[in-house]
């Protein structure tokens, strides 16, 4: 009886946490599809010992794959939702992928100042909210790879289309070319 009650309480806690944070961030921690993941991985530049940030790292699957593909890089996953963040942190240890770290942070409160590459799979409102911060903080030469959602007002250097029907494109932006020259174009 006690075991059943504990399981029921745990299930309720999991559901409340997942739905509560989905409501707060505006997006569920849905992982990138397998073809999408391959497209993102193929879109990443070589960064040597540089820093790659996954903005909204969910359950950590993509960040771990990125870390394995770039063993000299420092990969950082920021995630607000506690259960996906906890799972991703365990995944790091279980897979012994020590060049990735996961932090429970709000993307609007972290720094992008010393980052070489940002990867994200968010939603239209979230990328719009993040845009001024990325523009202000990302250093010249940085690359932003956005799965599915283009950054409003930015010009991608490349748009990679998936091989799989119904899957979404990946937008690649180079800083500062992505937004420089807008005033001249607009005026
Ligand atoms: C669609 S999931 C993508 C997960 C992972 N990046 C992937 O591609 O497999 C988006 C994730 O972004 C997180 N997220 C959204 N807004 C956030 C914010 N402001 N701060 C931190 N994480 C955020 C959500 O909690 C969710 O886990």
Image: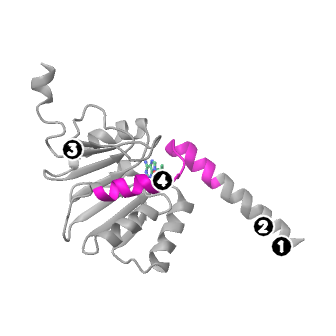
The answer to whether 68 is drawn above or below residue 132 in the figure is below
Work out whether mark 4 precedes mark 2 in sequence or the reverse, and give the earlier one.
2
Q: Residue at x 31, y 37 (%)?
A: 151
Work out whether mark 3 precedes mark 2 in sequence or the reverse, and give the earlier one.
2
Q: CA distance from mark 3 to mark 2?
A: 47 Å
Q: CA distance from mark 3 to mark 4?
A: 30 Å
Residue bearing the label numbered 3: 136
Q: CA distance from mark 1 to mark 2?
A: 6 Å
Work out whether mark 4 precedes mark 1 in sequence or the reverse, and give the earlier one.
1
Q: Nearer the viewer, residue 42 or 84?
A: 42
Work out whether mark 1 precedes mark 3 in sequence or the reverse, and give the earlier one.
1
Of circles 3 and 4, the one toward us is 4
Q: Residue at x 41, y 40 (%)?
A: 126
* Residues tagged 1 and 2 counted as in contact (Cβ below 8 A): yes
The answer to whether 110 is drawn above or below residue 125 in the figure is below
Q: Residues within 10 Å of mark 3 (few under 14, many from 20)?
A: few
* Residues tagged 4 and 2 counted as in contact (Cβ below 8 A): no
Residue bearing the label numbered 4: 33
The answer to whether 174 is drawn above or below residue 34 in the figure is above
Query: Which segment did they paint magenta?
Result: 17-42
Of circles 3 and 2, the one toward us is 2
Q: CA distance from mark 1 to mark 3?
A: 52 Å
């Amino acid at each position: 009886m006690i075991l059943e009650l504990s399981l029921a309480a745990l299930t309720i806690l999991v559901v409340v946490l997942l739905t509560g944070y989905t409501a707060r961030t505006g997006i569920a921690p849905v992982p990138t599809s397998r073809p999408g993941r391959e497209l993102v991985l193929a879109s990443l530049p070589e960064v040597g010992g540089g820093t790659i940030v996954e903005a909204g790292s969910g359950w950590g699957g993509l960040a771990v794959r990125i870390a394995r593909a770039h063993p000299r890089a420092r990969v950082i996953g920021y995630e607000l939702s506690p259960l996906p963040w906890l799972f991703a942190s365990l995944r790091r240890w279980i897979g012994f992928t020590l060049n990735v770290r996961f932090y429970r942070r709000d993307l609007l409160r972290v720094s992008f100042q010393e980052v070489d590459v940002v990867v994200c799979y968010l939603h239209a409102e979230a990328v719009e909210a993040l845009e001024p911060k990325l523009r202000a903080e990302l250093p010249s030469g940085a690359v932003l790879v956005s799965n599915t959602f283009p950054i409003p007002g930015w010009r991608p250097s490349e748009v990679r289309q998936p091989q799989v029907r119904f899957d979404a494109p990946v937008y690649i932006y180079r800083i500062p070319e992505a937004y420089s020259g807008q005033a001249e174009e607009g005026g």
